[in-house]
Image (spheres, rainbow, N blue to C red):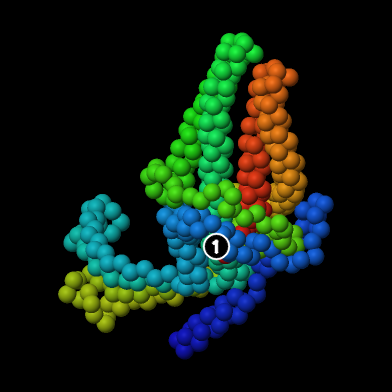
């Protein structure tokens, strides 16, 4: 009979291993997303390549900008926070991989017991004081019959990949923010140059208008208007210098250092690509970090639904314990003090206050929520690409009109001054022509800035920068 018992143990273990191959857990498959067909609206592409596949140091040519992006990726605090999130997710991933292993605990105890003289056993024992010494180990292992452990491990793996996507998203956003801030700085420098030139010209014009007043061609009102326009330009200069100062501070924070001056090139040196390849809309699923993160969240929710479903089925657990147990300390570590237990258990949940069903229903709802969030992220990504593409096209067209407008208004300003000097126009016509020309010149700079930013926006919207 003893031999029969020892034969049964390997049989139980063999059956546990055999059953562990029978999974009820489903395998994740990406949902069919019809939304990917027309994400870019009226933009059709037959080119599988995308600007997102290009490294940032190839897309951006300005040496100062490239240096700042490299510095930001090394020092930015958001990047460092994201790296710590990856480290935390990796720890959970290791925990998930260890789910197949048994648990092993060891303990040593000393138990002292004083029995009551009126108790069942104390009434007939002369020595009612006992000591017991235990040194034992407990091992427990659950067979993954229904794939619960496997699904849990896959959920941890999806969370880990999601943390990596979050890190990639921070990199993409950081590169975009640094480039945007840098381009704003060079554009502000260009505007400041225009204002400085305007101030110089208006200072000379004041002398001219004063001479005209002395000759009786204009009144003091004209001189006052010229001075007011000159002061307005000086006020604009102060505004621009203030904005440059604050934008430099913003750039410093992006680089992970204290506020300081930022070295930079000029706006005329910035190259605007004529065409930007966007690739197929489906590439957003593998390029855009927030879309990938949303899918990993969906995968995690899907696997947790598998875990919740497996709770309805019986679980098979093998438990073994053994060690030394003695009433005498000098006989504690002794062959006669050895004990051992081996238990194989099959547990089927029956009534548990609806906890398992609730857990399953919640898991299904969270899975559907994750699916809707995944689709929403994809639609938003497509909208951002579509917006950036249209903006790039519109700004390029508008830039040509703005340049022509500036040329016409500068000619009008020059001609109006000549006519004023010859008595054919009033000073108000000259003031209007000057202000219109200044506004148009500033808008040309703004239009070029928007063209540069549209390229940055396309690059970010397509998920570039983290590769």
Residue 101: x and y in percent read 47, 73
Q: Quadrant of residue 194?
A: top right
Is residue 210 visible in the rendered image? The answer is: yes
Q: Residue at x 80, y 51 (%)?
A: 41
> How many discs appear?
1
Residue 378: x and y in percent read 70, 53
Q: Residue at x 75, y 59 (%)?
A: 281
Q: Is residue 331 toward the left or the right of residue 418 in the image?
A: left
Q: Is residue 210 toward the left or the right of residue 40 in the image?
A: left
Q: Residue at x 80, y 55 (%)?
A: 43
In the picture of the structure, the residue carrying the numbered disc 1 is: 57
Is residue 356 visible in the rendered image? The answer is: no
Image quadrant holding the C terminus, namely bottom right
Q: Residue furthest bottom?
A: 3
- Camera-side residue of 92 and 2: 92
Residue 461: x and y in percent read 66, 53
77 versus 110 height, above or below: above
- Camera-side residue of 136 and 416: 416
- Camera-side residue of 293 and 11: 293
- Mark 1, residues whose alpha carbon is within 10 Å: few (<14), some, or many (≥20)? some
Residue 179: x and y in percent read 55, 51
- Camera-side residue of 31 and 446: 446
Q: Is residue 242 toward the left or the right of residue 161 in the image?
A: left
436 versus 323 height, above or below: above
159 versus 214 height, above or below: below
Tag 1 secondary structure: helix
Q: Residue at x 57, y 79 (%)?
A: 17
Q: Residue furthest front?
A: 215
């Amino acid at each position: 009979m003893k031999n029969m018992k020892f034969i049964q143990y390997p049989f139980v273990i063999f059956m546990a291993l055999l059953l562990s191959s029978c999974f009820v857990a489903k395998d994740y498959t990406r949902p069919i997303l019809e939304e990917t067909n027309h994400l870019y609206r009226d933009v059709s592409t037959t080119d599988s390549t995308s600007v997102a596949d290009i490294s940032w140091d190839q897309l951006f040519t300005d040496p100062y900008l490239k240096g700042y992006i490299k510095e930001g990726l090394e020092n930015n605090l958001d990047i460092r926070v994201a790296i710590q999130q990856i480290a935390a997710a990796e720890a959970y991933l290791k925990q998930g991989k260890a789910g197949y292993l048994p648990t092993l605990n060891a303990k040593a105890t000393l138990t002292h017991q004083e029995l009551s003289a009126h108790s069942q056993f104390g009434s007939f024992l002369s020595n009612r004081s006992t000591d017991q010494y235990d040194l034992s180990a407990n091992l427990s292992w659950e067979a993954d019959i229904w794939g619960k452990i496997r699904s849990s491990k896959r959920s941890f793996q999806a969370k880990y990949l999601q943390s990596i996507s979050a890190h990639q998203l921070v990199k993409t956003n950081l590169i975009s923010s640094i480039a945007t801030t840098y381009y704003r700085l060079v554009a502000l420098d260009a505007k400041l140059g225009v204002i400085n030139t305007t101030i110089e010209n208006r200072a000379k014009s004041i002398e001219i208008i004063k001479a005209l007043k002395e000759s009786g061609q204009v009144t003091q009102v004209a001189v006052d208007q010229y001075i007011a326009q000159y002061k307005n330009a000086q006020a604009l200069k102060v505004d621009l210098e203030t904005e440059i100062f604050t934008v430099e501070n913003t750039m410093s924070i992006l680089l992970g250092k204290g506020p300081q001056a930022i070295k930079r090139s000029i706006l005329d040196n910035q190259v605007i690509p004529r065409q930007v390849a966007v690739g197929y809309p489906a590439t957003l699923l593998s390029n855009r970090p927030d879309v990938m993160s949303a899918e990993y969240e969906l995968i995690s929710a899907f696997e947790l639904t598998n875990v919740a479903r497996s709770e309805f089925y019986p679980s098979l657990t093998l438990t073994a314990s053994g060690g030394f147990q003695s009433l005498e300390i000098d006989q504690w570590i002794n062959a006669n003090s050895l004990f051992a237990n081996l238990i194989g258990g099959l547990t089927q949940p029956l009534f548990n206050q609806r906890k398992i069903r609730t857990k399953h229903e919640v898991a299904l709802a969270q899975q559907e929520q994750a699916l809707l969030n995944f689709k929403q992220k994809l639609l938003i990504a497509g909208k951002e690409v579509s917006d950036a593409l249209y903006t790039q096209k519109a700004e390029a067209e508008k830039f040509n009109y703005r340049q022509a407008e500036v040329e016409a208004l500068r000619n009008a300003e020059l001609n109006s001054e000549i006519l004023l000097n010859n008595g054919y126009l009033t000073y108000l016509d000259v003031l209007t022509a000057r202000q219109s020309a200044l506004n148009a010149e500033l808008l040309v700079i703004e239009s070029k800035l928007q063209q540069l930013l549209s390229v940055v926006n396309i690059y970010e919207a397509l998920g570039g920068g983290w590769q």
